[in-house]
Amino acid sequence: MELTLQQVDVQPPSRLTLREEDEASIFHIEYRLEWSETGTRFTQISEFEWKKLPRMLHGTFARGVRRDVRGQLQAMKQLLER
């Protein structure tokens, strides 16, 4: 499956916005770095739309995407805490 990745916006060092598209979906992802009293806060905002998936399956697949993103962020957090 081919994936197209496009940088939509960048505001170093605090923000990066990407668009990812493959045969099945389109993702809009924003990464933010913000100062906080306890360190740097990392925020990821992910929005997606399905291109070919039947409407009745949208909720099921959306839960899977949210689970995967949480897992990725948790893995990143563990790496940073080492």
Image (spheres, helix red, strand yellow):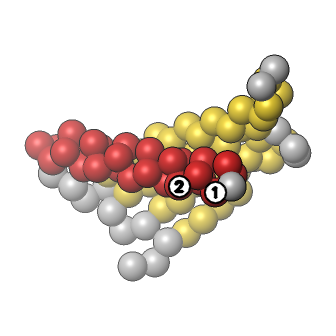
| Residue furthest right as drawn | 12
Look at 44% across and 45% down and name the residue there. Answer: 70
Q: Where does residue 72 sit, x and y in percent of width and height?
A: 49, 54
Identified at 82% across, 38% down, the residue is 14
- Is mark 2 in CB contact (under 8 Å) with mark 1? yes
Amino acid under disc 1: Leu
Disc 1, SS: helix
| SS at circle 2 | helix
Which x, y percent locates residue 55? 17, 44
Name the image quarter holding the N terminus: bottom left
Classify 15 as above or below 1: above
Residue 28 spot, x, y in % from top left? 54, 46
The quadrant in which the C terminus is found is bottom right
> Mark 2: which amino acid?
Ala
User: Which residue in the protein does label 1 denote?
Assistant: 79
Q: Which residue is mark 2?
A: 75
Cα–Cα span, label 2 and label 1: 6 Å
> Looking at the image, is 34 positioned above or below residue 53?
above
Mark 2: few/some/many CA within 10 Å (<14, 14-19, 20+): few
